[in-house]
Image (cartoon, coloured by chain):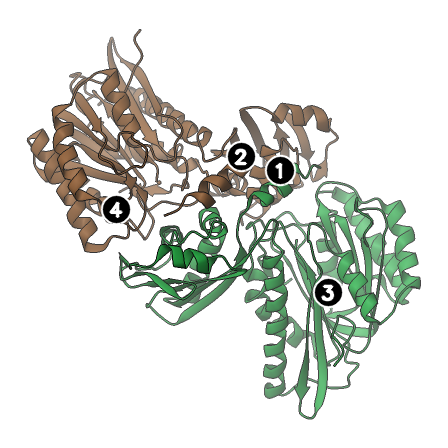
Chain colours: A brown, B green
């Protein structure tokens, strides 16, 4: 089977060009268009400071229909006042001309430095140019995936084939995100950007619920630096080009399962490519009293610089993990809980458990580390993905000048 | 005037010895005793995971009276189960024998690694020994101040002489804290430890309110890594040995002002000695809609690793600051606010303000950096102190093995 990509679902085309916004000569303006008017859903940042394309995007997604997406990287078009809005709308105008649709059917996205007005002269010409290079190949999908990257070191994508009865639909997605990753996206909330395509036919109201739910357990559960961006956006477009309608409960469940898996794969890729990351830390809180408690504890552990540094140093310093759970301000009883690192019990019932420090340190020296806190209080669970905190993170963020 | 120190207020004595808990041969067990039964108030960590000495300390402070404090560094006696409680009580028993008082009149404190049982054999002998070295000199005060340090690189102390009518009372304090600094101490809540002495006579109920209020604007407003410890403690002992009672509203205000200043000086010293710190970042949020909003925004800015890295790199990347305020989840309108860095306006009314980047970067290359966000929404204000985030922070916390 050939490799699936963003344009594998029927009915989509894409392109990307270099407009000179990024310093390095990599694609920085991209177009993703649906051949027809797609059913669409999006979640955006809940930051009180949100970029101009977020404001425009919220308007354009309101009707649940989109023809496509125009995106630039290298500049977030955030904190740019009235000019920022004018520029975000102008990007939609140009992309709409390419697609032959209304500007309100295009969702704009930007990512990069905050507080600089977009270099529209460069961008305007390049959007038109990108319109000439649209295609449906894997190369086109990869160029688009590259055009959304900033400090990312690699392209991020995931896809699935889904059996609906005897027929097959396709779901695919790309995303970016490496720093300023602490998304809390809400029904119309990361700078993470994620774009998902499917050729299934799904009504916008259903799509909205599916994306919101999937976001909670994926994009909103990944953290690099817990800094919610002004530009976080995830969009799901359903072209319907497969002719297969998702209407029954069974089909919906099947689709949701795949959507969750694709979103979680993308979230995992963000953690793995977190700024300076050498490993993914998977934090699983189990049997918590309530869902918010599970979420708060998993997040407190995943966000602690002390925990992240210990993981970087392969140090089984579990006291930092237990104390992070305890600071979440939710129901938690250390005398009941069991903490395991890479499957090794280190703390149980309020007391340390003897373990071979050198052996566990060797187990922590891995590209994925599993932290599991069993609260033994209820039935709620939450998984978060984060990365370790390394000297390279400081280099990237202290030396990256505006 | 000779330099003021922890034992300058009349009625206190202290000592410290090396018991072999710390790796480096520095004092790690200390005694601070009042000659008489002191009026006392304390605030402790609000972490759900709290150390054995916190549990014992909450009991012992309940009556508002204490003879003194016994403290060890190098081991937090946290997550140590029933044995931890036995050990914390035993420390009180031994200190009480020295002081000739009831064990319930001694407050125990511990700081250091979590999850290891205290080496009581070493500690027991040394508490008795410390009892033989008690004194009232500056050297004794300094030894006690040293005995509470862990990853700190320097001793922290502050003091004030306070005029009450024609008479003078003295207030002094020492503290420790460098990592795991994100205190939220509550009336009976940081591992920061702070011990304050005064020779004024103040009733316990008054003392409690004064310490709680001062803590909010000092210890609870300092963050290095936003990781609330299992052991955070601040204690204020009033010996009354000056014979001067603080009862009138005017005298109370005078005392409170000095108490706030001493606590803020100690908090500042913690930020300045934050793990890997090269500078203090003073974040002042002004004219916010409400006090909780001001606090949430100041804290979000002070806790952002992206802001802290930018400050380390002398980078006027103000988008990170504005977006941090926006993620606090409180009332905030970027179109109204004014952000200044080292007195230079960089963002106003939703739009960037042109500034000389090189000149501002040079201004940021200082041991204290001032970030001021004027929200122009109300009258609430909050100041937080933090430090920059450096490679040295990673070295300290990734290479420090359990």
Neighbour class for label 2 at 10 Å: few (<14), some, many (≥20)?
A: many
Label drawn at residue A77: 4
What is the chain identity of the residue bearing mark 3?
B
Identify whether B139 is placed above or below B240: above
Q: Taking A39 as reference, is B95 left or right?
A: right
The secondary structure type at the circle numbered 3 is helix
What x and y, as percent, mark residue B153? 69, 54
Q: Which mark is first along the chain, 1 or 3?
A: 3
The secondary structure type at the circle numbered 1 is helix
Foreground label between 3 and 1: 1
Foreground label between 2 and 4: 4
Mark 1 highlights which residue?
B398
What x and y, as percent, mark residue A355? 73, 28
Farthest residue to the bottom: give it.
B166
Residues flagged by tags 1 and 2 on a common chain: no
Residue name at image x 77 percent, y 46 percent: B84
Neighbour class for label 1 at 10 Å: few (<14), some, many (≥20)?
A: many
Mark 2 highlights which residue?
A388
Tell me which corner region of the image, top left, top right, bottom left or bottom right, holds residue B377: bottom left
Mark 3 highlights which residue?
B61
């Amino acid at each position: 089977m050939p490799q699936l990509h963003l344009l594998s679902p029927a009915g989509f085309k894409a392109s990307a060009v270099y407009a000179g916004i990024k310093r390095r000569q990599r694609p920085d303006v991209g177009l993703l268009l649906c051949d027809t008017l797609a059913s669409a859903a999006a979640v955006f940042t809940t930051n009180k400071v949100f970029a101009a394309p977020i404001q425009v995007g919220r308007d354009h997604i309101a009707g649940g229909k989109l023809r496509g997406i125009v995106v630039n990287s290298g500049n977030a078009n955030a904190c740019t006042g009235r000019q920022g809005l004018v520029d975000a709308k102008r990007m939609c105008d140009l992309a709409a001309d390419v697609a032959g649709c209304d500007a309100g059917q295009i969702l704009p996205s930007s990512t990069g430095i905050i507080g600089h007005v977009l270099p529209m002269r460069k961008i305007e010409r390049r959007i038109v140019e990108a319109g000439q290079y649209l295609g449906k190949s894997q190369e086109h999908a990869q160029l688009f995936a590259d055009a959304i990257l900033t400090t990312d070191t690699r392209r991020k994508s995931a896809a699935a084939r889904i059996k609906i009865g005897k027929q097959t639909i396709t779901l695919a997605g790309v995303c970016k995100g490496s720093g300023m990753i602490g998304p809390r996206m809400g029904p119309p909330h990361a700078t993470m950007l994620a774009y998902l395509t499917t050729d299934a036919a799904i009504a916008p109201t259903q799509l909205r619920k599916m994306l919101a739910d999937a976001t909670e357990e994926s994009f909103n559960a990944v953290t690099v630096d817990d800094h919610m961006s002004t530009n976080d956006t995830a969009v799901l477009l359903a072209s319907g080009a497969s002719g297969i309608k998702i209407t029954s409960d069974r089909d919906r469940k099947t689709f949701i399962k795949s959507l969750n898996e694709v979103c979680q794969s993308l979230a995992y890729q963000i953690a793995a490519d977190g700024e300076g990351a050498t490993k993914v830390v998977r934090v699983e809180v189990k049997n918590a009293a309530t869902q918010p408690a599970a979420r708060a504890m998993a997040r407190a552990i995943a966000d602690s610089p002390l925990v992240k540094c210990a993981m970087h140093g392969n140090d089984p310093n579990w006291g930092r993990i237990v104390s992070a759970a305890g600071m979440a301000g939710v129901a938690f009883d250390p005398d009941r809980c069991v903490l395991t690192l890479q499957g090794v019990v280190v703390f149980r019932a309020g007391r340390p458990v003897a373990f071979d420090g050198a052996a566990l340190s060797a187990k922590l020296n891995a590209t994925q580390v599993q932290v599991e806190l069993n609260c033994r209080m209820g039935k709620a669970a939450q998984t978060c993905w984060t990365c370790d905190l390394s000297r390279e993170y400081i280099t990237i963020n202290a030396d990256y000048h505006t």
